[in-house]
C-alpha cells in the first residue's frame, strides 16, 4: 500500500488527518517482517477507530473502506477537480496524471488485507468491508453527503479500469462539485488566526415551501428571483421583512433545499462579521456555484456602523460584486437601521448637517435591496387555517372547532398570532395531548 500511495500525483495533497498514509506505513511495517505484534495491532485499531468516527459522521454503511476512499476523491480540492467542476472532463495532459491516480485508488479499493489479518489474528478489515451501521436519524449525520458518496463508491466498485473511474469521478464533479462547497448546502463563517474560513453546517432543516402555509405571493416572488439567479439571469438582492414568526427565515431555508442540486449554496453571516465580507467574496467568486449570503434578523442601532460595510459590498464599492453572489436578509424592521423622530426634523444640527441627510443615510441601505418582500402577521382566520393544516399533516384528530378553540387559548398566552405560534401549539399537542387520547 505504501508504494501505491507514493504514486499519487494529482491527489497528493491529501488532508493532514487522512488514514491512507498511516495505514500505508502500517502495511509497509508488516511487509518488512520487523514489528511487534501488539504495537502494530494497536496502530491498526487506532486507524480503524478513526475510520468508524468518519463513518458515523457521514452515515456510511456496507464497505466503509470503499466509502472512505470515495470520500477522499470527492473532498480533495485540486486544480484538476476544480476545473472538472466548472467544465467537466476536458482534453489535456493532466488527464493522464489523473488516470494514474484513479488506477491507484482502484487498486486501493481492491487491496487485500487478508494476509495481514490472518498473521496478526485480527478481523477488523473484514468487518469494515461488510459493515452494518446502526440506523440513525437524519439530524445526526449529513444524509446528503452520505447518499452521494455511497452511490459513487458502489459505482467505482464495479468500474472495470481507471478510464471508467475517470468518467465516474469527473461526472460527479460536474454534477455536484468538489470539496466542502460541493458536498454541503450551507456554511457559517469562522474567523481563524490565518483568516476567515467557511465551516459546513452539517444538519440543515429539511423544510420546503409546502411546509410554509400561506404567503403564496411572497413565496412566488422569492422563487422567481432565486430561479433567475440560479439560471444565470439578472437577479436582485432580497430583503424579507415583517412580523416575527411569519416564515421569513423558513422561506430562506426552503430556498436552499429546493435549489441545492442546481448549484446553490448558502453562507450565514452575522453583522459583527461584515468586515470579513470582502475576504469571503474573494474566496468564492471563481467557484462554479451560486452563493446566497444570508443575514438573519438584520437590524442596526444608531451606534452600530457595521451597515456601512454591507452598503459598500452590495453597491457602491469600486469592485463589482460577482455575478454568482446575492445577499438575502430577513428583518422585523422595514428600514433596518433604527430611525427616530429627530431624524425626520430637517433643522440643522449644531455641526451644520441637515438631519434629513441622516435619514437618507439610513434609508440608503434598504434601497440597495432590489427585491423587498413583506411577511405580515396573519389574521385569526388565517391563523386557524395554519393550525388546522398542520394538525392534519401530523395526524391530530381533534374536531376543528375544538382545535381552533384550543389554538386561541394558546396564542393568548404564547406571543400572539403567527405561524410560529401555530407550530408551537401543534408541537404541544403532539407532545402532551396525543398520548392521552
Image (cartoon, helix red, strand yellow):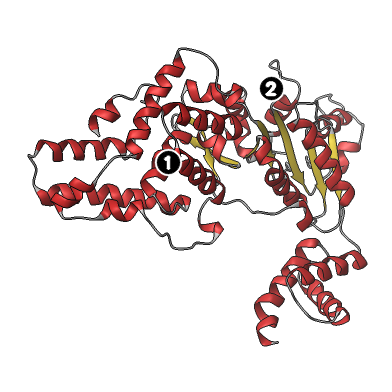
Which residue is identified by label 2? 322
Q: Residue at x 37, y 23 (%)?
A: 100
Image side of residue 96 versus residue 34, left or right: right
Which of pointers 1 and 2 indicates the residue nearer the eye?
Answer: 1
Secondary-structure class at tag 2: loop
Which residue is identified by label 1? 157
In which image quadrant can residue 30 be found? top left
Residue 428 in view of the camera: yes
Image side of residue 154 versus residue 386, left or right: left
For marks 1 and 2 on the same chain, the one whose residue lies earlier in the sequence:
1
Q: Residue at x 34, y 29 (%)?
A: 104
Residue neighbourhood size for the residue with mark 2, other residues' Cα within 10 Å, grouped as few (<14), some (14–19), many (≥20): some
Q: Nearer the viewer, residue 94 or 423?
A: 94
Q: Residue furthest front?
A: 160
Residue 13 in view of the camera: no
Residue neighbourhood size for the residue with mark 1, other residues' Cα within 10 Å, grouped as few (<14), some (14–19), many (≥20): some
Evaluate if marks 1 and 2 touch, with contact meaning CB atoms under 8 Å apart: no
In which image quadrant can residue 410 be found? bottom right
Residue 121 location (% of width, % of height): 16, 55
Whole-angstrom CA distance, mark 1 to mark 2, is 40 Å
Residue 317 location (% of width, % of height): 71, 19
Q: Nearer the viewer, residue 97 or 344?
A: 97
Q: Is residue 313 above or below residue 202?
A: above
Q: Residue furthest top?
A: 93
Amino acid at each position: 500500500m505504501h508504494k501505491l500511495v507514493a504514486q499519487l500525483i494529482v491527489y497528493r495533497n491529501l488532508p493532514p488527518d487522512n488514514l491512507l498514509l498511516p495505514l500505508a506505513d502500517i502495511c509497509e511495517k508488516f511487509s518488512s517482517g520487523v514489528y511487534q505484534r501488539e504495537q502494530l495491532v494497536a496502530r491498526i485499531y487506532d486507524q480503524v477507530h478513526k475510520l468508524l468516527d468518519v463513518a458515523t459522521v457521514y452515515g456510511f454503511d456496507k464497505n466503509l473502506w470503499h466509502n472512505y476512499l470515495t470520500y477522499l476523491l470527492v473532498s480533495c480540492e485540486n486544480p484538476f477537480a476544480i476545473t472538472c467542476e466548472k467544465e467537466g472532463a476536458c482534453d489535456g495532459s493532466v488527464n493522464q496524471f489523473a488516470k494514474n491516480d484513479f488506477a491507484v485508488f482502484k487498486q486501493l479499493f481492491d487491496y487485500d488485507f487478508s494476509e495481514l489479518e490472518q498473521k496478526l489474528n485480527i478481523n477488523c478489515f473484514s468487518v469494515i468491508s461488510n459493515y452494518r451501521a446502526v440506523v440513525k436519524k437524519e439530524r445526526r449525520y449529513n444524509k446528503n453527503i452520505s447518499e452521494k458518496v455511497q452511490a459513487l463508491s458502489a459505482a467505482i466498485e464495479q468500474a472495470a479500469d481507471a478510464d471508467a473511474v475517470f468518467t465516474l469521478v469527473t461526472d460527479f464533479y460536474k454534477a455536484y462539485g468538489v470539496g466542502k462547497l460541493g458536498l454541503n448546502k450551507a456554511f457559517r463563517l469562522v474567523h481563524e488566526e490565518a483568516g476567515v474560513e467557511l465551516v459546513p453546517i452539517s444538519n440543515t432543516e429539511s423544510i420546503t415551501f409546502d411546509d410554509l402555509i400561506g404567503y403564496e405571493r411572497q413565496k412566488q416572488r422569492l422563487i422567481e428571483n432565486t430561479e433567475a439567479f440560479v439560471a444565470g439571469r439578472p437577479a436582485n438582492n432580497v430583503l424579507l421583512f415583517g412580523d416575527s414568526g411569519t416564515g421569513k427565515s423558513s422561506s430562506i431555508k426552503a430556498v436552499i433545499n429546493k435549489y441545492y442540486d442546481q448549484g446553490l449554496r448558502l453562507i450565514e453571516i452575522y453583522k459583527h462579521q461584515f468586515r470579513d465580507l470582502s475576504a469571503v467574496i474573494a474566496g468564492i467568486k471563481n467557484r462554479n456555484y451560486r452563493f446566497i449570503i444570508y443575514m438573519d434578523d438584520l437590524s442596526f442601532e444608531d451606534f452600530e456602523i457595521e451597515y456601512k460595510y454591507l452598503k459598500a459590498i452590495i453597491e457602491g464599492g469600486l469592485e463589482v460584486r460577482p455575478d454568482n453572489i446575492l445577499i438575502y436578509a430577513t428583518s422585523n424592521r422595514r428600514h433596518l437601521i433604527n430611525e427616530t423622530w429627530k431624524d425626520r426634523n430637517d433643522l440643522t444640527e449644531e455641526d451644520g448637517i441637515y438631519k434629513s441627510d441622516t435619514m437618507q443615510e439610513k434609508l440608503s441601505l434598504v434601497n440597495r435591496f432590489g427585491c423587498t418582500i413583506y411577511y405580515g402577521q396573519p389574521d385569526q382566520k388565517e391563523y386557524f387555517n395554519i393550525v388546522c393544516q398542520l394538525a392534519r399533516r401530523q395526524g391530530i384528530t381533534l374536531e376543528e372547532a375544538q382545535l381552533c378553540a384550543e389554538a386561541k387559548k394558546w396564542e393568548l398566552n404564547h406571543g400572539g398570532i403567527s405561524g410560529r405560534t401555530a407550530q408551537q401549539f401543534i408541537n404541544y399537542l403532539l407532545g402532551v395531548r396525543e398520548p392521552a387520547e
